[in-house]
Image (tube, rainbow, N blue to C red):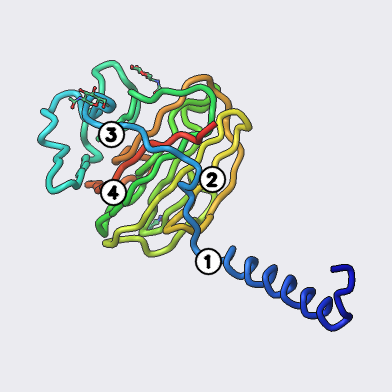
Amino acid sequence: MSTLSFYSKAMLLRIIVQLITWHDSLAWGPIDPTLGFVSLPLNRSYYNIQKPSDVPEDRRYSFCDGIHKCWVYSTDKPHTPTSLTKPRTEIAIHGYNYSSGVWQFEGYGYVPAGTSGVCIMQVFGATSPHASTLMLRVYNGTLMYYRSVVLADEIYDKWFRVNVVHDADASKVKVYLDGYLKLEADGRGGTSHAFKCGVYAQEGDSLCMESRWRGIKVMKKCD
Ligand SMILES: *[C@@H]1O[C@H](CO)[C@@H](O)[C@H](O)[C@H]1NC(C)=O
Ligand SMILES: *[C@@H]1O[C@H](CO)[C@@H](O)[C@H](O)[C@H]1NC(C)=O
Ligand SMILES: *[C@@H]1O[C@H](CO)[C@@H](O)[C@H](O)[C@H]1NC(C)=O
């Protein structure tokens, strides 16, 4: 038992080194960001559709064959008569407002060519003057974190999986696209957060904006 030969020790060391190398190379591939999270129930009672205040919901939103479609025009009114914000059609998951814990949004997003100058997903809630902790925006086919970090080029006309992890305790956000970590950023304060996706016009908005979503999940890290 005590007498591993020099040869076996060398072999063992080689195996260990190989396992480490193997593990490191795997870490570069896509991962499953949802490991350790539980998926929470999600139906219409957990979200509402924010859309231009003067048009019926079905003129800006549809849910068909499991696909949520949100669209809005740059000439539309804000979502409430008193709001001064730009137009939006957003799925607002207010049923899961949170102030602590580690939360995750998962969804498959799709943005048709032409949609630009728009936020397609956000972690709402932050310390004033900010309103959001994270925004995923599309400018000319590029998916960006606000207007500062490019997350992916040429995203038009294809489905992509979005996983946004918000650690409200540590005030950190992470964005994964198709399982690849694309961004780690600091939170921006706030005491109440909620996930939203759809279209919310930003500076330089195109005349028409649209995003589609399927497989939307809200998850919470197990304690
Ligand atoms: C939504 O899900 C909750 C929890 O699973 C359930 O209690 C509720 O009845 C559901 N509401 C609708 C409108 O389906
Ligand atoms: C998007 O493209 C248009 C036209 O090519 C250009 O005018 C605009 O500056 C671009 N916007 C951004 C944010 O790159
Ligand atoms: C929390 O939910 C309420 C509605 O239940 C909503 O009015 C409020 O804006 C939500 N807060 C956030 C941060 O979304």
Report the front residue among 98 and 19: 19
Q: Which of marks 1 and 4 is nearer the N terminus?
A: 1
Could you tell me which residue is drawn at 22 percent across and 40 percent down? 72
The quarter of the image that holds ligand 2 is bottom left
Kindly report the distance in space between the C-alpha atoms of the residues bearing marks 1 and 4.
35 Å
Q: Earlier in the sequence, mark 2 or mark 4?
A: 2
Q: Name the residue under label 4.
A: 206
Report the front residue among 6 and 68: 6
Which residue is outermost to the top? 82
Using the image, determine if residue 150 lies above or below residue 173.
Answer: below
Kindly report the distance in space between the C-alpha atoms of the residues bearing marks 1 and 3.
31 Å
Element assignment for label 4: loop
Give the x, y percent position of residue 206: 28, 48
Could you tell me which residue is drawn at 26 percent across and 59 percent down? 113
* Left or right: 39 in relation to 103: left
Q: Mark 1 points at which residue?
A: 29
How many other residues sit within 10 Å of disc 2, few (<14), some (14-19) or many (≥20)?
Answer: some
Element assignment for label 3: strand
How many other residues sit within 10 Å of disc 4, few (<14), some (14-19) or many (≥20)?
Answer: many
Give the label, 2 or 1, closer to the camera: 1
Q: Where, by quadrant of the figure, is residue 160 drawn?
A: bottom left
Q: Name the residue under label 3.
A: 91
Q: Which of marks 3 and 2 is nearer the N terminus?
A: 3
Give the x, y percent position of residue 12: 77, 74
Numbered mark located on residue 174 in the image: 2
Give the label, 2 or 4, closer to the camera: 2
Could you tell me which residue is drawn at 55 percent across and 31 percent down? 223
Amino acid carrying label 3: it is Ile
Numbered mark located on residue 188 in the image: none
Number of numbered discs overlaid on the protein picture: 4
Kindly report the distance in space between the C-alpha atoms of the residues bearing marks 3 and 2.
21 Å
Give the label, 1 or 4, closer to the camera: 1
